[in-house]
Image (spheres, rainbow, N blue to C red):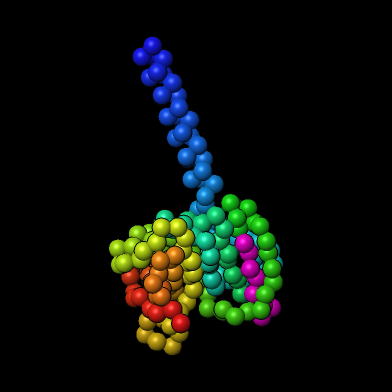
Amino acid sequence: MRTKSLTLFSLLTVIALFLCSSLAYAAGATAKAWLAQAQESAIKWQADATLVQISTLSGNMDGTAEKWSFLFHSPQAKKGYKVDVKQSKIAQTLEVSSSFTDALDGDFIDGAQVMVEAKKKGLKGKNRSMMTLHVMLQGTKSQGAYWNIVSDLAEGRSTLIHAKTGKFFRHQPLK
């Protein structure tokens, strides 16, 4: 009887682990995981399309998200192109006005590392975070690519992490 109980318990444990890992995979990925798909779509739109922003409104506190939005700019067309990737598939594309024009290269620290650093520096949150990567602080000696993170318990501030180094830059008040 004890062997049957142990076998049943083992079987249930394996099933539970399988289900949890499937749910974790379905929950999302980091921005870099889906960047190539977005870039491919943008290049089909305009050959000179350059990445200018990455964002999610519903990031997980581990730096992943179910959906990432990638914004590209075409200097030739003077327009923007938004590519939403959800669960590894392009969910939507949209030509938009060009509000961001400073290019990001693919050499940035991804969301998982960014969230580790942000949490070390006081970012709190249990559920969701808004994460945006773009060039900030134009015209200053600190100009560069930064992750801007606002969690569900941000207490009126955002956390800036330098996108190249992954190092904390500062907290700034939300206005």
Residue farthest toward the bottom in the current orientation of the protein: 139
In front here: 92 or 129? 129
Q: Which residues are magenta?
A: 75-84
Give x and y (percent) for residue 120. Answer: 30, 63
Q: Is residue 117 left or right of residue 106?
A: left
Q: Main secondary structure of the magenta part?
A: strand
Measuring 57% from the left and 58% from the top, which residue is drawn there? 67
Which of these two is toward me, 88 or 38? 88
Relative image position of residue 118 (x, y in whole percent): 35, 65
Judge by depth and name the residue closer to the eye, 143 or 87.
Answer: 87
Q: Is residue 33 above or below residue 73?
A: above
The furthest residue to the front:
1
- Classify 11 as above or below 86: above
* Residue at 38% from the left image edge and 11% from the top image edge: 1
- At x 40% / y 87%, what residue is drawn? 140
Left or right, residue 44 beside residue 86: right
Name the residue at 30% across, 67% down.
121
Q: Is residue 139 magenta?
A: no
- What percent of the width, then of the height, locates residue 75? 63, 79
**Callout count:** 0
Is 160 positioned to the left or the right of 120 in the image?
A: right
Asked where in the image residue 124 lies, by quadrant, the reply is bottom left
Q: Is residue 162 above or below residue 11?
A: below
In the rendered image, residue 154, in percent from the top left (x then y), is placed at 40, 69
- Residue 117 is at least partly visible in this image: no
Q: Is residue 81 magenta?
A: yes
